[in-house]
């Protein structure tokens, strides 16, 4: 009986230790659904896929995760839809919680704060920046790579930020919604 209890404690300890540590990640996503909140003059529209870099620290079922992502944007107002203007970036810090589902699968949710900025390569007056929040949920498959732990994940994320800039003096809200497929590796 003592051996069985010791074995259960050992397995529980090893499984939580295997899921602890620092990790890096890379994700590629859909072109985000984007709403710039100003029904009179939409300034930006996403174009192409999104990308994301991750850096996180995991303790058991809880992680703190930082990310930097971005996607191309085009100008949408003044009947010049499709004119390339620049890039939208999102830097965020989130708290992530996971729920083991079995067979190395986990469900997760995350919530945090973000800073978003949009650069305009041709006309800086369209550039804007601001702060907001991010929320997301997804499924993760944990990998044992021999040298360390890793995972493959799919995430649906929603972000919102109030942007201001030369052509946005009214602190307009911008929301994004996108799917991301990614890979993390323990370091």
Image: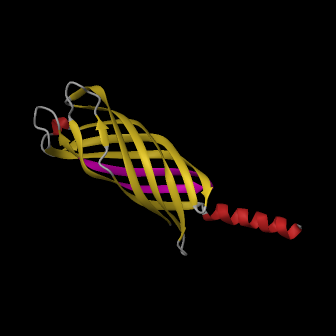
Is 54 magenta? The answer is yes
Q: Percent position (x, y) of residue 168?
A: 23, 29
The segment highlighted magenta reads 52-72
Judging from the image, the colouring scheme is secondary structure
Q: Residue furthest left?
A: 79
Instruction: Indicate the quadrant containing the N terminus: top left, top right, bottom left or bottom right.
Output: bottom right
Q: Percent position (x, y) of residue 72?
A: 23, 48
Q: Is residue 11 left or right of residue 169?
A: right
Residue ID at (47%, 57%) = 153
Q: Using the image as rendered, state which of residue 75 and residue 93 is in the foreground.
A: 75
Q: Using the image as rendered, state which of residue 163 and residue 176 is in the foreground.
A: 176
Is 157 magenta? The answer is no
Q: Is residue 82 left or right of residue 129?
A: left
Q: Percent position (x, y) of residue 104?
A: 58, 62
Q: How many marks?
A: 0
Q: Residue furthest bottom?
A: 146
Residue ID at (71%, 63%) = 13
Residue ID at (66%, 60%) = 16
Q: Quadrant of residue 105?
A: bottom right
Q: Percent position (x, y) of residue 181?
A: 40, 56
Above or below, 146 relative to 70: below
Above or below, 29 relative to 131: below
Residue ID at (42%, 44%) = 157
Q: Main secondary structure of the magenta part?
A: strand
């Amino acid at each position: 009986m003592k051996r069985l209890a010791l074995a259960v404690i050992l397995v529980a300890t090893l499984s939580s230790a295997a899921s602890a540590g620092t990790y890096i990640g890379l994700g590629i996503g859909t072109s985000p659904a984007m709403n710039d909140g100003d029904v009179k003059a939409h300034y930006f529209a996403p174009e192409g896929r999104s990308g994301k870099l991750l850096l996180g620290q995991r303790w058991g079922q809880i992680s703190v995760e930082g990310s930097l992502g971005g996607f191309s944007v085009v100008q949408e107002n003044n009947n010049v839809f499709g004119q390339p203007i620049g890039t939208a970036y999102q830097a965020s810090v989130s708290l992530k919680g996971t729920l083991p589902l079995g067979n190395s699968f986990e469900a997760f949710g995350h919530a945090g704060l973000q800073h978003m900025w949009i650069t305009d390569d041709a006309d800086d007056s369209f550039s804007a920046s601001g702060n907001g929040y991010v929320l997301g949920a997804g499924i993760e498959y944990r990998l044992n790579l021999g040298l360390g732990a890793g995972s493959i994940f799919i995430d649906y994320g929603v972000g919102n930020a109030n942007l201001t800039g030369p052509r946005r003096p009214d602190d307009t809200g911008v929301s994004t919604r996108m799917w991301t497929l990614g890979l993390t590796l323990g370091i």
